Amino acid sequence: MELGGGTVWLRSTPDGQNVLIINHGDIVLLLDGHANRAARMWREVSTVTGDVGWLPVEFLNTAEN
């Protein structure tokens, strides 16, 4: 999974505390978690270095969307 564009914060929970910045082109692995917070869809992901957190789905570039 590649970040679609720009930068976005990896969050500890959906819409939670900022953990680290994910940059355009960074690869993340999709995990099982899905969430809907205030009409925004989130996915649980892991970075290639093992950091786990949540990203809004509109920032993910996948064959699914």
Image (cartoon, helix red, strand yellow):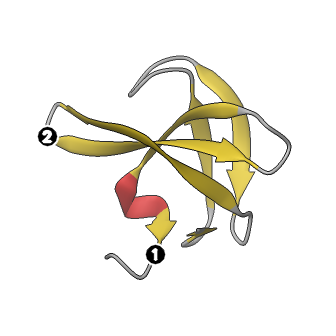
Classify mark 1: residues with Cα within 10 Å, few (<14), some (14-19) or many (20+): few
- Residue 63 position, x and y percent, is 41, 82
As helix, strand or loop, the secondary structure at mark 2 comes to loop
Above or below, comparing residue 53 to residue 29 in the picture:
above
- Residue 52 position, x and y percent, is 65, 32
Above or below, comparing residue 22 to residue 50 in the picture:
below
Classify mark 2: residues with Cα within 10 Å, few (<14), some (14-19) or many (20+): few
Badge 1 amino acid: Thr
Residue underneath mark 2: 39
Badge 2 amino acid: Ala
- Residue 23 position, x and y percent, is 72, 59
Residue underneath mark 1: 62
In the rendered image, which quarter is residue 24 located in?
bottom right
Above or below, comparing residue 64 to residue 12 in the picture:
below
**Quarter of the image where the N terminus is located:** bottom right
Q: Earlier in the sequence, mark 2 or mark 1?
A: 2
> In this orientation, which residue lies closer to the viewer: 15 or 1?
1
Name of the residue lying farthest toward the bottom: 63
| Residue sitting at x 48%, y 64% | 60
**Quarter of the image where the C terminus is located:** bottom left
Name of the residue lying farthest toward the right: 49
CB atoms of marks 2 and 1 within 8 Å: no
In the rendered image, which quarter is residue 39 located in?
top left
- Residue 59 position, x and y percent, is 47, 61
Above or below, comparing residue 6 to residue 22 in the picture:
below
